């Protein structure tokens, strides 16, 4: 049994331009939490591991 196939022409999607964010003010750095990058050191050999 065959399933009939018909190509469908899809309409083009129009995405509007991104609005300007002139009123955005970045919060002070003191309000951010620092998370150490431990994952970048995984798998790297150190003097202790050799």
Image: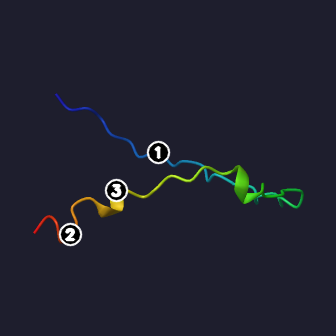
Q: As drawn, is 31 to the left or to the right of 2?
A: right
- In the rendered structure, which disc, 2 or 1, sits on the residue that comes first in sequence? 1
Q: Which residue is label 1 attached to?
A: 8
Taking the view exactly as shown, the residue that stands out farthest to the front is: 48
Given the current orientation, which residue lies at the most extreme right position? 23
Q: Nearer the viewer, mark 3 or mark 2?
A: 2
Depth check: give the residue in front, 36 or 5: 36
Q: Residue at x 71, y 58 (%)?
A: 29
Mark sitting earlier along the chain (3/1): 1
- Going by the picture, which residue comes out furthest to the left? 50
Asked if the residue at tag 1 contacts the one at tag 3, i.e. Cβ–Cβ closer than 8 Å, the answer is no
Tell which tag, 3 or 1, sits nearer the viewer: 3
Mark 2 vs mark 1, CA separation in Å? 58 Å
Callout 2 touching callout 1 (CB < 8 Å)? no
> Upstream in the sequence, badge 3 or badge 2?
3
Please tell me which residue is depicted at 51% across the width and 49% down the height of the picture.
Answer: 9
- Does residue 2 sit above or below 28 in this rendering? above
Viewer-nearest of discs 2 and 1: 2
Q: Nearer the viewer, residue 18 or 24?
A: 24
Q: Could you say which is closer to the camera, residue 25 or residue 7? A: 25
Label 3, on which residue? 39
Is 45 rendered above or below residue 7?
Answer: below
Q: Give the Cα separation between the discs numbered 3 and 1.
A: 46 Å
* Element assignment for label 3: helix
32 left or right, relative to 17: left
Q: Which residue is mark 2?
A: 46
The image position of residue 26, as x and y in percent, is: 78, 58
Q: Is residue 8 left or right of residue 13?
A: left
How packed mark 3 is, by other alpha carbons closer than 10 Å (few <14, some 14-19, many 20 or more), is few
């Amino acid at each position: 049994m065959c399933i009939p196939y018909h190509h469908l022409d899809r309409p083009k999607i129009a995405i509007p331009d991104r609005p300007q964010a002139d009123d955005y003010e970045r919060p002070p750095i003191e309000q951010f939490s620092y998370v150490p990058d431990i994952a970048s050191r995984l798998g790297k050999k150190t003097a202790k591991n050799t």
